[in-house]
Amino acid sequence: MWDLLKAHFKQGHRTSAYPKGPVDFPERFRGRPTVDASKCTDGCQACADACPTGAIQLGTPPKLDLGKCLFCQECVAACPSKAIAYTRDHQMAARTREDLVVSSTEMKLTAALDKKSRELFGRSLKLRQVAAGDCSGCAAELQALNNVVFDLGRFGIQFVASPRHADGLIITGPVTDNMRLALQKTYEAVPAPKLVIAVGACAISGGPFRDSPQAHNGVEGTLPIDLYVPGCPPHPLTILDGLLRLLGRLESGTREEVYQKR
């Protein structure tokens, strides 16, 4: 017993200070990618050719589709002018698919649910996770939310075993043929009103399995989506940030608008 207590004292407080304190990410963390259009060379499409999922849309200005991005850095290696870079910004979740297609250094932060929905879900949100043909990468990040570092339960958000006890679904994977009916039945079992959260590039757009005959390019077309969390896989704090903003626990709008309010 004493050895256990000494070990706890030695480890100290391990729960992240987020959202009230600074966030420490590992050195190799890849946050939101950006494109510096001023560095782009006319006619160059090396980055678009290198992207395995077609996440880069050439034009004036060029655009990045975070819903398709695998964060693989192939575009960074291919770009001769070094116009593409990955930031340390973990705030990437969005309410609409269109908000994930960005052409500047700014993007809209997740907008909150309407007042009635915030009153229903804001203090206690129960989610059933569905692995719709995923590789387990995104599922592992969701599982990490329950550990002592992120401690999801302190925000009143919990994963539950039965969809009948849930307020919504949090879905990973491209929605394969073998999982589509199971996903639909699980959704039907969740009592209304309910939420649907798509986590990871596969759930948003199909990821590397896009246009495969065995997959359905993500959740869209099967279920309505209330929150999109990009990444391959997304960091636990990217998921948590989106959830808290969806529930109105953090401010929404662009970063500039939020900072002006302060």
Image: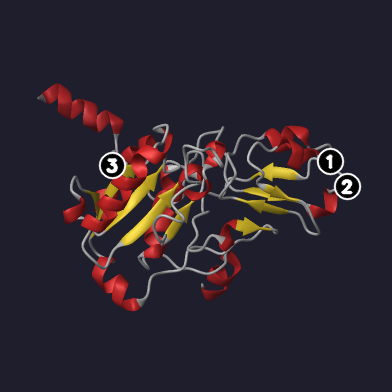
Q: Residue at x 46, y 68 (%)?
A: 111
Task: Name the residue carrying label 3.
Answer: 146
Q: Confirm or deny contact between disc 3 and disc 2 (CB under 8 A).
A: no
Q: Specify the farthest residue to the front.
A: 213
Q: Could you classify mark 2 by the number of other residues whose Cα lies within 10 Å: few (under 14), some (14-19), or many (20 or more)?
A: few
User: Residue furthest toward the top?
Assistant: 3
Q: Judge whether residue 214 can be spotted in this image.
A: yes
Give x and y (percent) for residue 166.
22, 55
Residue 102: percent from left, percent from top: 65, 58
Q: Is residue 258 above or below residue 39?
A: below
- Tell me the number on the disc at residue 168: none
What is the x, y in percent for residue 109?
52, 63
Q: Secondary structure beneath disc 3?
A: loop
Left or right, 63 with reference to 247: right
Which label's residue is closer to the chain start, 1 or 2?
A: 2
Name the residue tied to disc 1: 81
What residue is at 53 percent from the left and 54 percent from the top? 92
User: Could you say which is closer to the camera, residue 18 or residue 110?
Assistant: 110
CA neighbours of label 1 inside 10 A, class few (<14), some (14 to 19), many (20+):
few
The residue labelled by disc 2 is 41
Q: Measure the alpha-carbon separation of dots 3 and 2.
A: 45 Å
Find out whether the residues at labels 1 and 2 contact each other: C-beta distance under 8 Å.
yes
